[in-house]
Image: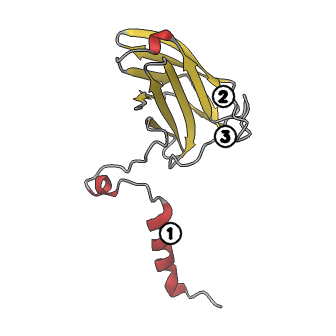
Amino acid sequence: MKFSLRLLPLALGFALLVGCDRHDHAAEKKGGSHAHTAPHGGALIEVGEHAYNLELLREPAAGKLTVWVLDGHAENFVRIKAAALEATATVGSDKKTVSLKAVANPATGETVGDTSQFEAQADWLKGSLPVEVTFTPFEIKGRRFEGLSGKAGVAVK
């Protein structure tokens, strides 16, 4: 079976149409950018011009903050070689240093130093005030990222 060059524009158009099926196309038409859905209901931080995402989720009752490293469409987990992610968390007017420790997951084979999930737990993370998280520079797949910050989404139970 030969491929006709006349079908190339059609094939490219189809690839672009289905390439990112979780876009917010209504926002794109209004001049905005597209958006992805955080798999755990947290807040997403875009990393590296659509290369990756960080999902931040806070459980205020438990005083727990979880971060997942995700791909550019927030669909797949991306393992990184880190024992922890360091950050500054701003709660109200207080700034606190927080170390989000790598979480091993035997079900997926993720280990400390090769995982996509990081967690911190502290009493000062409890309560209703929003938490702004600013990460110190870190690497994903050999690329260094800095200046990443965002508000942690709150877990709804």
Any mark on residue 103, and which? 2
Tell me the element at label 2: loop
Q: Which quadrant: the C terminus? A: top left
Quarter of the figure with residue 149: top left
Sequence-earlier tag: 3 or 2: 2
The residue wearing badge 1 is 15
Residue type at the position of mark 1:
Ala
Q: CA distance from mark 3 to mark 2?
A: 18 Å
Q: Position of residue 114 (x, y in %)?
A: 72, 34
Could you tell me which residue is drawn at 30 percent across and 52 percent down? 27
Residue type at the position of mark 2:
Val
**How many other residues sit within 10 Å of disc 2, few (<14), some (14-19) or many (≥20)?**
many
Left or right side of 2 for 63? left
Q: Position of residue 89 (x, y in %)?
A: 46, 17
- Which colour scheme appears in the figure? secondary structure
Sequence-earlier tag: 2 or 1: 1
Q: CA distance from mark 2 to mark 1?
A: 36 Å
Left or right side of 135 for 22? left
Could you tell me which residue is drawn at 66 percent across and 28 percent down? 103
The residue wearing badge 3 is 141
